[in-house]
Image (cartoon, grey):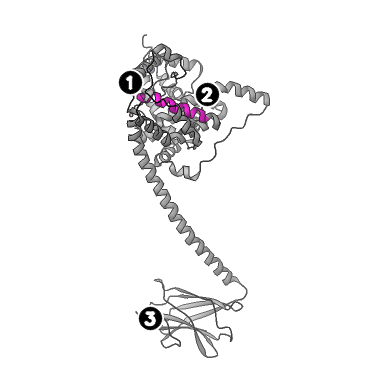
Amino acid sequence: MKEGDREAMASLYDGHASAVLGLLVRLLRDRAEAEEVLQDVFLQAWRQADRYQADRATPRGWLLMMARSRGLDRLRSRTARVRREEESEGTPSSPTRATAPEVVERLAESERTHQIRRALGTLPTEQRIPIQLAFFEGLTHTEVADRLAAPLGTVKSRILLGMRKLRTALEPYRP
Amino acid sequence: MNVSPHDPRWQDLLPVFALEALEGEDRRQLEEHLASGCATCRAELEELKRDLAVLAEAVSSVEPSPEIRQRLMDQLPGQSPKIVPFGSRLNTAAAPSATDDSIAAPSSGLLSVGLWRGLAMAAALTGVLLGLATFWQQRELGAVRYERDRLVGQLERNHGQLEELRSEAKALASEVSALTSRQARQVVLAGLEEAPGAKALAYVDEVQSTARFYAFDLPATPSGHEYQLWVISAGVPASAGVFTVEEDGSARVEISALPAERPIDAWAVTIEPSGGVPQPTGPMVLLSS
Ligand SMILES: [Zn+2]
């Protein structure tokens, strides 16, 4: 591989690693584990760069979706173990929260991030919350239903309605 | 495999499926239906994945530890990734799993196709990353830089404003304390013939020998002239400063050292040549009662 591609990789990392780590920390709630997966994600990007399709996702979106898949695998493979631990301890383990992003990091977040966040914010809360729980925290629809103390069917239909609204709201930001 | 009949029910489940949140029998059946090749559902799933790839960008950043970058770069092969036979590739740690190709449908039926295509195109990898990175990176960097500059500019402006507000607040606070201090004595000045609508107030702190003077509804002075404030003790006027008025006819004068030897009998304002004069010469416009 050309040296140029290593440089490209470095610049891809510099541009998106903090967003990818942000997603992983949110999903896994464990910084050390999230950083492990972060490396895997970029190695995967290195191997699969040819699969990237610019009309389907931005590089950041592409990386984030890979990160989500890998993070979700981790999350679900450990879920049973964590549950057992929680049950034996009697108290749920408190999630390790990501340190609040520094002001400087916030500055680096692009206008685009803010706009996408704003678009998400336009959803009614009852539709937004289940989508956020499933997407960013990796909950299954039964877990979402449990968390919100809502019937399964209700959760499904709220996600359906929410995703429809989201499509309109996110339309300007799709590649 | 025959395409299993499309049912609108699938479309209702697709969003939950795309979120990888669907479980149980629903998930199994939908996967089967997708694998059978329903074009409607596959197309919708693609669309949902696109939406989610955008939504993912809403996440807050967390800065990675600096050593991660070096560790990653060290792990990158120096040469093109070797194209290994299909079968053996599957058994290596580097083999993409079913969830790797997250943009594509997570149906296992697509896996082999995606993997084959990936391997076939690996030879053409060179430059793909570079192109990908440079195009979007430049675009995003531009946006980020613009945003950063905008925010930094805003911060600087806010900082300036903050300083201004701070000193204003400080001034106000000291004014308020002067106005409300027990020693403050209030002197009222009324407009004379030259400016019948004008009025003024002086708050005199006799202990500190300081005063604040506020005038209102004064006409602008003729060019080359300013107002001059006088304090009169035992019939002798002493200058307490010159001032001009704002557009609204108001003015404010701070007097840091009043003549302390003798009590002040009266306050007055005259129109004088710019810079003021030792003794009043011009018409008097305000006089204390
Ligand atoms: Zn279908």
Quadrant of the image occupied by residue B114: top left
Does B145 sit above or below residue B231? Answer: above
Disc 3: host chain: B
Query: Residue A173 placed where, x, y %?
Result: 36, 35
Q: Secondary structure at mark 3?
A: strand
Q: Residue furthest top?
A: B1
| Amino acid on which disc 1 is placed | Ala
Numbered disc in front, either 1 or 3: 1
Q: Secondary structure at mark 1?
A: helix
Magenta stretch: dominant SS?
A: helix
Alpha carbon distance from label 2 to label 1? 31 Å
Disc 1: host chain: B
| Amino acid on which disc 3 is placed | His
The residue indicated by pointer 1 is B123
Q: Is mark 3 within 8 Å of ligand 1?
A: no
Q: Quadrant of ligand 1?
A: top left
The residue indicated by pointer 3 is B225
Does A169 sit above or below residue B92? Answer: below
Residue B55 painted magenta: no
Query: Residue B78 placed where, x, y %?
Result: 39, 26
| Amino acid on which disc 2 is placed | Arg
The mark found on residue A74 in the picture is 2
Quadrant of the image occupied by residue B73: top left
Q: Nearer the viewer, residue B174 or B285?
A: B174
Q: Is residue A89 visible?
A: yes
Q: Residue at x 55, y 31 (%)?
A: A32
